[in-house]
Each structure stands twice: as C-alpha cells, then as structure tokens.
Image: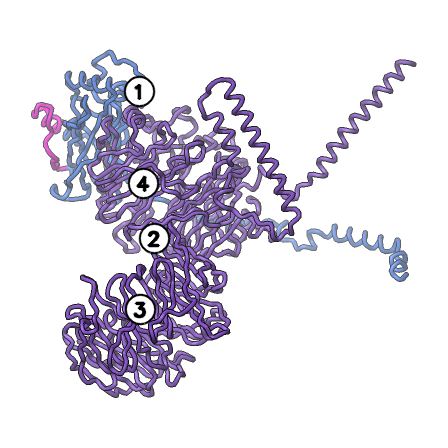
Amino acid sequence: VKMARLLQFKIAVVSTVLFVVCTNLVCCNNGRRVGDAMDTEFSGFSVPLEHSFEVDDVAKFKVRGALVLKAGREHSVSLTQNQLSEEDRAKLKEVAAVDGLYRIRVPRVFLQADRQTERQMDGYLTAFVRACAMVESHLSDVIALYSDVSGYLIGVSIVTLPGACRGTEVEDEVDLEVFNTTLSIMAPVNAPGPETALFLERMEQETEKKGKNPQEQKSFFAKYWYLILGGAIFLMATNSAQPPAGGEGEQS
Amino acid sequence: MAKLILLCLKFIILSSAVEAVFEDQVGKFDWRQEYVGKVRFSHFDTHVQSSKKVLLATENNVFAALNTRTGELFWRHVDKTGPEGNIDALLQHGQDVVLVVGNGRLLRSWEINVGGLNWEIVLDSGSFQSACLVGQQDNVKHVAVLKKTVISFHYLSNGHQKWIENLPESETVDYQSVYSDGNGEVYALGIVPHSHIAIVAYSVEDGEIIKQVTMIHTAWLSNIQASCVVISQGMLTCVDPLTVSLYMLDLHTESQMTQIPLQSLGLEVAPGFHPVLVSTQPNPGRQPLSEFFLQLGPDYYQLLQLNNGQIVTLRDFKPVRNNFSTLYEYLFSSLQASSLNLFSAETGRRLLDTTLIFNMDPYGGKPEKLHVQAFLKKDDSVGYRVMVQTEDHTLTFIQQPGRVMWTREEALSDVVTMEMVDLPLTGTQAELEGEFGKKADGLMSMVLKRLSSQLILLQAWIAHLWKLFYDARKPRSQVKNEVTIENLSRDEFNLQKMMVMVTASGKLFGIDSKTGSILWRHYLDNIPSNAAFKLMVQRTTAHFPHPPQCTLLIKDKDTGLATLHVFNPIFGKKSHVSPPALPQPILQSLMLPLMDQDYAKVLLLVDDQYKVSAFPSTKNVLQQLQEMASSIFFYLVDSTQGRLSGYRLRTDLSTELIWEVVIPAEVQKIVSVKGKRPNEHVHSQGRVMGDRSVLYKYLNPNLLAVVTESTDLHQERSFVGILLIDGVTGRIIHEAVQRKARGPVHVVHSENWVVYEYWSTKSRRNEFSVIELYEGMELYNSTVFSSLDRPHAPQVLQQSYIFPSYISTLEATLTEKGITSRHLLIGLPSGGILSLPKMFLDPRRPEIVSEQSREENLIPYAPELLIRTEWFINYNQTVSRVRGIYTAPSGLESTCLVVAYGLDIYQTRVYPSKQFDVLKDDYDYMLISSVLFALFFATMISKRLAEVKLLNRAWR
C-alpha cells in the first residue's frame, strides 16, 4: 500500500498516522472493503472511493481507496488507496482494449455536519474516463471533488495525464500497479461584483494629479493668448487691406 | 458620479462607432406588428352611425380600439401582466368605456375616440363579482359595482362615489350578480347554495334598502351567473338541469317561484348537457328583451319569448353546428356551417337578404364567438357585419355578402418559440441544381437536360423582361410586389427568410421576414393547455429535391407525454412522413449532426425508461447510430432534485449512466441550463495580446452553463450560483457564487464566454457579469476538441458591471462565419431593444491603462454600463412585453437578422461591425466607372502616342 501524493495540502504528521490506521483497516478487510465512513478524532472523516471497470460496461463498483475529508474554512482531502491486483490489471487492460469506461464514484456527503448520520446522504456522485486513457497514463489521474457553498459535495471529476488514447501498448505490468493520484477539493469561488471603490479612487487620483499640474490650471486666455492675439492681428490686417471692396459690392 | 459618467462617455465616444437609423431608412429593413391577445370582451362603438371602432379587452390585459375597416389599431393600452391588470368587466356607454381592473381594484373610464383616460378611482378591497350601468329613462349616469361584501355606486361622469352600502348577511349569502332596469332600483342577487336566493333592492338615489327578500327556497340552485338571467320586466329566470324545468320569479313582486317544466313546452335537453340561458339588455336604462335563448345541447338553441307571463317557443336552431349566437336588439344571427343568417327576435323569422356565406380557413380553428354589428341601411333594411372569433384566437371581420374585410392573428401575441428557415431557390435555380443532384445516365441525356434547363432559364429571363416592360407602363402606385407562397425565393444575400413561429394556442405561422406578411398558418387542435414546445429544423432547404422539414415536439408538462408534428416550413403543410407514436413520457430530445440518406438530421428522443428512439428510424440511421453510439452523449436535468446526469448511448439504443452531479435542492435550485447554439461559428481561435502573443480561447462545444438560485431569499444570504459543466464528462469546469444576489437571472452562453444578469440585493441594482474561459498561451490539441481529452482546466476571468435598468430578455447576435464582432441584444421592459457591444463586457478590461492594453484596444474598466440612445435598434418602435429575441445569420457576414417577440413582433437587421461588406446606398458608381474609363482611354492614347514618338525617333 502506498500513500497518495498530495500536492496542494500540507498534511501534518498526525494525519499521516491516521492514514496508517486507515490503511491497516483496509488490509484487514482483505484490501477490498474499506469500512463505511468513520469518524476520527481530528474532525476529518472518511468515505470510500469506489471504481468500476467492466468489459460489458455494467457498473460493478468496488472500493479503490478511502477519502479522508476535513471540513473547515478550507476543506481538505486526502486519499489512501490500494494497489491494483493482478486480475484487476488484466481486466483494466481488457476494458481498455474494447474502449470501455473506467468509472469512479463517491457517496454524497455533507461536510459541515457534526454527526455521522447527518453527513451521509443517499446517492452517489459519479464520473468516468476512458479506460485506455487510464492505462496509457500509467494510472496517473487527477481527481477533483467539488463542494457547494454550504458544504455539500456536488460533483467529482477524473482526468488522466496525459489524457489522450494513442493506442500505445503498456508492456510493463508494474506501471499499472500503483495509482498516482493528484487530489483536490474545490469550493465555489466568489464572483466579483462591480469594482466601484477602486474606480472612484482612481478617478480621484486623476483629478488630484490634474490639480497639481499648473499647466492644467491656467485659464483659457492664459493658455492660448498667443493664438488669440495672432488671430486678432490677422483679422485687423485683412480688414484694413480691403475695406471698401465688400461694401461697394453690396450696395451695387 | 458626474465625472464617472463623463469619463465613461469619453471612452465610449473614443471606442465605438455610431450606429443608428437614418430617417429615410425607417421601415425599410424592419417592421413591427402590434397585437392585443385573445379577446375577452368586445363592443362595437354604435353611438355614432359612422363610427368604425370596435373596442376590445383581452386576456393579455390589453384594452384597444380597432378600425373595423382595416383591422388596424386606433390605440392600445397595455396594462400590467398577471392578475393585477386583469380586466374584469367592460361597460360601454356613449363615448365612455368603464373598465373594472385587477379583481375590482380599479375603476377606469376611457374616452374612446382618442383612447384617453377620463378618470380612475381606487375601489375598496374585496373580490369583484359583477358590475352594471344604471340608468333612468334612457339616461345612464351611474355604474354599480358589486363586490363580495359591498355594493358601491359611482357617477359615470367623474367616478365619484355616490354611495356605498354593506350587503346584508354577506357572510352566508354569496352575492353574484347586480341588475338594474331603469326604474330607480338596483338589485343585488345573491344565493346561499342549495338553500335559497337572496334579493336586495337598493334605491338609486341614496342606497337605501327598499326591499329585501331571502326566503325563496331554491335548493337546486348553486350558481346564479351560470344558470339565471333576467328577462322582460324583471323576471329572474333560472334553469334547473335536474328537474329539466325553468323557474321564474318576478323581482318586483317577489311572490313565488313558478316552475315551468320544459316538457310542457315540448323541449328536451341533450343528455349530460347543462342548459344555458342567454338574454340581452340593449340599453341599461330599459328593460331587457322578453325574448331569450335556451341552449339545450352543444349545437341546439331554442328561442323563447315571455308573452303575458306565458313562455312561447319561437324557433329552434337545431343544426347550429358552431357554438354561439348573439341576441342583438331585435336581431340575432346564427352560424350554421359557415353561413350566417339574421333572424328577427320578435317573430323568429329569417330576415331576407341577410345570409352571409364565408369560407372557413381549413387550417384554422372552429368559431368560438360571434360579435355582430347590426345597423339600419338607408332603405330601412337591416345590414350587419360580424367579427368571428375562433379557437385559435383569430379575429375575422366579415361584411355582407361574405367578404372578409380583414383578419387578425391574435395568437401571435403569444409566440413561444421560433426558427428562421432559408427560402428555397427559385424553380429555375432548383432545376439547375437538380441537374447535379440526379444520377448521371448517359452523355446524351445529360446534354439534353442541360439544354432544357438553359431553355427554361431563357424563358424565365424573357418573362422577367416582359414583366419589367409591362410594369413600367403602369403608374408606380399600382405596381405591387406582393409576396405570395408561389413567388417565394431566396434573395441574393439570403436576407429574406421564412420565420416559423409557434404560439401558445397551438397555431403555427410562416411569416416572410422581409415584409411580415403571414404566408401560411396551421392550427393544431388537441394541444394541451400547459404544453411545452420545441421546434427543430431537421432538413434545411439546401437538399433539393428533398423538401425542407421541421419537427415540432409538443409535450404535456404534467404527464410528459409528447407528440410530434412534422411539416414543411416553407408551405406549412403537414409532411407525409409519419412521426413515430410516443407512448412513453419523453425526458429529452436532441438533434444529432448525423443525417439519413435523405439528408434529414436524426432526432433522438429519450423516454422515462431511458430508452432512446430515433426519428427518422430507417435502417441507414440505425446503422449509423450503432457505429456512433459510443460517442453520443447526452445529459438530463432534474431541477426538482437538483440532479444533472450524463448518459451514453449503447449500440442497442439503450443508455448507460456515466456521470452524476447532484446540487442539493434544499440549498439551491437549478433555474436554467444553457448550452451553446449548434449553428454558431467561431472564427478566431484566440486573441492577440498587446505583446503579439496569442491567448487561446477555451472553445468547448459541450459546455453547459448551469444557473442556480438559493432557496433562502433573505437579502443577506441569497446568492446566485453559476456552474460551468462539461456535458460529456460531467466535469465541473468552473463554479462561482454571486453573493447577495437573486434572480431573475438571464444568461447568454456563446463562444468562450457566459454573460449573466442578476439583481444585487445588497446594492439594489441590476448587474451584469461576464465569465471568459481561456486555454492559455498554448493550445492543448489545436486540431480537434474532445471533452474526453482536455485534462487541464481553463483559465477563468470574470468581471461585473452595473446596468441601469431591469431587463426582460437577453440574446447575442449571430453571423454566418463569426468574423463580425458580437453584440448583446437586451430587451428592456420599456420596450426598447438595446444592442450592447460585447466589447464592454470583457473581463480583460484593465483597471489601469497600460501600453499593452491600449495596443489591444481594450476599453479601460468602468463599473457602469451606459445605455446610449443610439444603441436602441428599434428607435421609436416600442416592442411591448418582450419575452424573447431570436437571432439568425444572413448570407452577409456583417448582417444579423433579429426578431423580438412578446405582445408585439419586431423584425430588423443589425450590423454589429457596420456594413463592412456592403457598398453604401449612395456609392458613386458613375464617378468610379468614369474615372476607370478615363484612365483606360488615357493609357490607350498615351500608348499610341508613345508608339508614334518611338517610331518618329527611330526614323530620325
């Protein structure tokens, strides 16, 4: 049994101990059945992560590992999972060959509840990838859990890295033994509202800047006196040059 | 604030082009049609002989006056929607019409010549029962309004209340009707169901109770309005279906109810039919007529007369196939088949020369009501006109001897969904096209075919020339280019299309988008009242000789049972293709891009057993489906449980559940799920940034925008949630929550962006928010998009703006190739349609202007979106109660066709990037061609001169 790799969350040593406890329990159950969700003293609790891959595509979910969820301001999650047995490996390759699906599911839970009974809700959240993608990526998958505002788990997703099925043969059985899972739990982000405060601040800054700049403060005449003067001189010059012509023309 | 606006204005002026209609373009590319809705009350204006008005009050809370000569609106008043604006009663007297509005909340008087409001008063609360005009000696001065507990009396001239009285014993007695016949008394008729009638007579002068009778036992009577009328000299006449007899009571003497068995009159009631009485009071100041109708069966009316206390049968109208007759002064008409006759009420004899025969529209509904306007001709004979109201909400106005003056399709006031279909090619073009479609059969026949089609072309051309010549001799005004179904053909730029509109009443229309004329109509009967419609184009006109084909899915919302109506969208005819029977409730329908051998797209229907059936389901289709099954995915939404689930098709047409997302319904409910439009093209894969790098768009065609609203409506805790989910894998791409916000939310989802509008409870204003998705600086797989192979989540950018108005509906423009920039079309409650450039809703609008953002032409961020009057695409053509906007691309890349529908229908064209591919109307062809010719000749001459010069030089 190998630990799942966790990228985003710092896991304290204490919780590592917890994992060992979990995995022990898994071992006791012949590696097939993780007990139903259980409480721990660290307010985290665990739910089974199940998977299914069948040649005839009729879902038969079996336990893949246990998710330990921790509610809080920032939800956190960690995963302990079993290795794939030899027959499972063979089956997965078989399913991949017929372009079957690899499905996972987690039960619906409510993260914020205090008591065990309130957490569990009926129904599951399911997701899938193509089995061939699972095989070709050597079981490196990215699983994300999504919660809503109030802490209900609403969805799960699984993608593999790389995601494509290119038909490359996976020779080494060892590559399909251990899951290389990246796990995360996402809560909804707060959508931004209109940014009025910042905008007004910027406007004020701009007006202040304008106020400081003496060039801007000058009056109209102060700024363009030379143009006005030039224009006036020009007008006077043209008027004095030919005053009688226009007048006579009009009279006649 | 002023500075803010000023700055915004500056930016706008700098950044956007002015877009408006010139005065001479008004009505050139656009049209509007105004409707009123299904008629509830109608009155012909009779106080002036020459008047040509008919007053209508409708179920859509509209009060309007129509011109009886043309069918056009004189004026129209649109009240609030819903029960608040509901018109309960319409009473006409002379030039005034009194309306009771909103379950007796308001009493209004209108002047009918110009449609001005005379007065309006607010009535006391209480549910409205009945109202009548009260007069004395032909002098009508008052109106009486009966409510649950009070009766009030108002002056007709100014609405002031003359008196108001509480009704006695109103807790037990249900007062239902008010009656007056001009003798200074007003009667309130009430009933204790299955016990007795209560009659209270009030004095008109001061509201004093003159008489009060409560002890008339009528155990058989349960509803006065349904089974009683007042005839002649205040005889309350009721009909009892159980004992099959008439009961009569004199309101003035209140002696005893006399029972007259119908059998004694030799009449029989059709089994299972509740008999109905119909009477008429031509003048509120006088007594009602002593003649009245008794409807004894669905198509059987009997005319009766009260003569010296005795009831006499005058005439029976047995084969009245259609439902209604109206007693009108001393005349009435009956509708038999499609002929109308006028009878004298006094004698029951048919009047001479009053037969009116008209042709019923075979694609319309059955007549429901007749509104008859009778008048005396100059020679003292009786003439009449009639307005027929049919089941499909059509009004047809007919004049003797059967000339249809006009028809109004009021069903169009309630358009549910629509599509625009390309018009077919002309016959000759189609002939040429057909040449390539057919299979080749020998060289000789091909040559002959080509020659024949060339001949046809020549013939058409000569005919065209002849027509031009012929028309040129006629004066301008007579030359009309009437669009009919025969000469429909596609224009050069495909700007003229067929608008297929589906209305709530179940009537389908084909409307020419250029002129707005209705080219075909088809009424579907047996439409359930709560039906949901989905219109799909299965085959376009591009596959000659196969006719275009549209399919309408009609689903009963309660049972889920659905039917299909397959028709030709150009001619409206029902297709000979028989749709499959659908015995199971339908959950989902989807159009596949697959086509059968006849080029009809495949429609998949998923029933409640999650079994899939295909239409058309030929062998070819089933084979294709089997091959494609593993790549056909679909999703179902169950908004009551908040469940979104994805399914994949199996080769045996069953389905398998592959993903599930459950949004707990106790916290938030799904209000809308929007995918992208399948006919949308995106021209550019990315956006060029200021530093010349490219930011690639995340263009997932399977992306769904799911909008939720919180169930908690407290203004601090309410929120609007937005989820972007991949419809194939069920992966949540983005999940955001707009806090302190609530609906109604309007969403547009297109390209790589989602725009939504909501009400901010915190700031008490409407706000727009835009989400854009980008893959980043590199594309994962630039050739093909597959939801199954996109492991990296896109970058999400979001920005919000303040919008200074409520909105009714939201849609985005659509063009042929997607090169033209996009605009958002916003239907405002004021009746304007605003075309807002998408450029203003761009999350990359910078807070602080930098060199790079200027390079990219980004507008600096301003929190407020302004409404500029030039952006209204419908200038002064107000569109009342916009419910939806439909956009369709045209053959010109710059042009997008827009139809806004609600109570009115408005069609126009928009040019989001101006008409970059069209020469202007005033383009100077002469100048350009003369310059070209001049240059050409100049080169010729100079060439010649140069040659001569060279030759001369060579000789030297």
Is residue A22 within the magenta segment?
yes
Callout 2 secondary element: loop
Callout 4 secondary element: strand
User: Which label belongs to residue B723?
Assistant: 4
Residue at 61% across, 53% down: B477
User: Which label belongs to residue B103?
Assistant: 3
In this rendered view, identify the residue nearer to me: B269 or B106: B269
Residue marked by disc 1: A165
Label 2 vs 3, first from the N-terminus: 3
Residue at 28% across, 20% down: A137
Which chain does the purple colour mark? B
Callout 1 secondary element: loop
Q: From the image, which quarter does the C terminus of chain B lie in?
A: top right
The x and y percentages for residue B290 are 30, 78
Residue marked by disc 2: B505
Protein image colouring: by chain
User: Which chain letter goes with mark 4?
Assistant: B
Is residue B367 within the magenta segment?
no
**Do callouts 2 and 4 mark residues in contact (Cβ within 8 Å)?**
no
Q: Amino acid at mark 1?
A: Cys
Query: Across the whole image, how many numbered discs are drawn on residues?
Result: 4
Measured in 3D between alpha carbons, the distance from the residue under mark 2 to the one under mark 3, in whole angstroms, is 25 Å
Measured in 3D between alpha carbons, the distance from the residue under mark 1 to the one under mark 3, in whole angstroms, is 67 Å
Quarter of image, res A174? top left
The residue stretch that appears in magenta:
A20-41
Quarter of image, res B621? top left
Q: Amino acid at mark 2?
A: Ser
Q: Of circles 1 and 3, which is in front?
A: 3
Neighbour class for label 2 at 10 Å: few (<14), some, many (≥20)? many
Measured in 3D between alpha carbons, the distance from the residue under mark 2 to the one under mark 4, in whole angstroms, is 35 Å
User: Which chain letter goes with mark 3?
Assistant: B
The x and y percentages for residue B142 are 37, 81
